[in-house]
Amino acid sequence: MSEPVFSYDQMPWRDVRALPGARGFEFKALVCDEPEYTSAYSCELVRLDPGDHSVPHVEKWNHTLIFLSGTGDVTIKERTWEVMPGTVAKVRAGERHSLRNLGSDEMLVMTIYDPPRPREQGEAT
């Protein structure tokens, strides 16, 4: 098990900028693949620079997006909402969704996956 207390500032960003159709996307896996800690969820910190976005996509995990900094929008199914620090978005498994950073600062999003989203070494998506 990793240390129970740590700083995510000391972790490197994992670059997934090559994701087809997306423009920029980096993450840090904060709770991932730690069955001795929990098998209920995984948690990542996601960063999008100004102008970055994810393509509309569908995933097999429920996830909660907690917007910590930046401004932009999130689209879930056919509806789009503005997001800012303090916004929480709930995306069900199988729902088409996307994010856009429309501001002039980086966007940081805490993402909680249920069930845990496994990330293999080198896996981008």
Image (cartoon, helix red, strand yellow):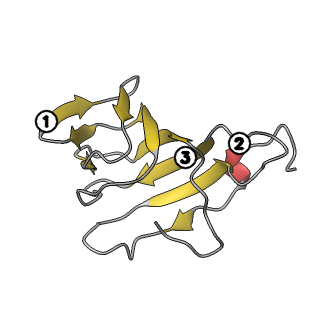
Give the residue at mark 3: 45
Q: Which is in the foreground here, disc 1 or disc 2? A: 2
Counting residues from the start of the chain, the first of labels 3 and 1 encountered is 3
Counting residues from the start of the chain, the first of labels 1 and 2 encountered is 2
* Relative to 112, residue 10 above or below: below
The quarter holding residue 19 reads: bottom left
The one nearer the camera, 43 or 28, is 43
The quarter holding residue 66 reads: top left
Q: Residues within 10 Å of mark 3 (few under 14, many from 20)?
A: many
| 102 sits left or right of 35 in the view | left
Counting residues from the start of the chain, the first of labels 3 and 2 encountered is 2
Q: Residues within 10 Å of mark 2 (few under 14, many from 20)?
A: some
The one nearer the camera, 59 or 121, is 59
Q: Which is in the foreground here, disc 3 or disc 1? A: 1
Amino acid under disc 1: Arg
| 116 sits left or right of 7 in the view | left
Say which element carries label 1: strand
Q: Are marks 3 and 2 in contact (CB under 8 Å)?
A: no
Amino acid under disc 2: Ser
The one nearer the camera, 64 or 103, is 64
Q: Give the numbered dot on residue 79.
A: 1
Question: Which residue is outermost to the left?
Answer: 78
Say which element carries label 3: strand
